[in-house]
Amino acid sequence: MTSIDCRRILVAQMLLIMALSVLLSTNCSAETPDNGMNSLTLEQCLSVARAHNPKVLASWEKINELVADYTAARSTFFPRIAASSYYYKIDSGRLGNGGAATSRLFHEESLHSLTGKQILFDGFKTYFNQKAAGIGIEAQKQEAENTTRAIEYAVTEAFYRLIEADENVKVAENALEQRREFEQLTRAFYEAGKVTKLDF
């Protein structure tokens, strides 16, 4: 192996170490970093993902929409009540068209009404709408759980890959240090004349 090949290997190893260092510069790490940044445990990473992942939040918010649909479907079982009222008073000093005083028979007028509607039978439409809305809520809960589990799996996988990458960096740094020590030893032997130039 020539000195050019040794330098190429050293450059390649340094590039590998730099690339892995860039990959490891995230908030989630398995150990406490020396640079003063806070590291997160796996459970903390999972908690952050559950609280802030848009897919998880959207799937749980969909449940609230389906609960509102269920309530709307159920509300048709109950009677609908409408109330209206008005009151009208005619001014007592008002004159009629001919200039004579108006008759005092009707000088106040009011109307009050209360109406109610109740569906007696609609061909089980309301019943099945309510039942479908309830099943939709349960299905969405399962979907939200599946989404949460998928995100938790992805976070766990990324967390352990980060640990693995951190260990790979340590192994690469250790191997690089051993190569440097071996190079120094070989150079010392070469300069002492104990090895030929072909062995270097």
Image: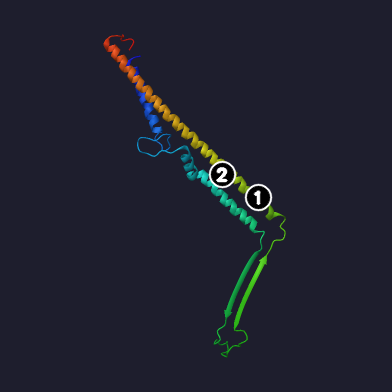
Please tell me whether mark 2 or mark 1 is closer to you in this view.
2
In the rendered image, residue 93, in percent from the top left (x then y), is placed at 54, 87
Residue 77 occupies quadrant: bottom right
Image quadrant holding the N terminus, namely top left
42 vs 111, nearest the viewer:
42
Instruction: For mark 2, give the secondary structure.
Output: helix
Tally of marks: 2
Quarter holding the C terminus is top left
Give the answer, above or below, for where 104 lies relative to 4: below
Give, as a three-letter code, the residue at label 2: Ala
- Residue 29: percent from left, percent from top: 42, 35
- Residue placed most toward the observer, 106 or 69: 69
Residue located at (49% from left, 34% from top) = 157
In the image, taking residue 19 as reference, residue 135 lies left or right, namely right
> Looking at the image, is mark 2 or mark 1 earlier in the sequence?
1
In this view, 13 is above or below 112: above
Residue 60 percent coordinates (x, y): 54, 47
State the residue position of label 1: 132
x and y percentages locating residue 174 in the rendered image:
37, 24
Q: Quadrant of residue 171?
A: top left
* Circle 2 residue: 144
In the displayed structure, 38 sits above or below 118; it is above
Task: Identify the element where label 1 is drawn.
Answer: helix
154 on left or right of 110: left
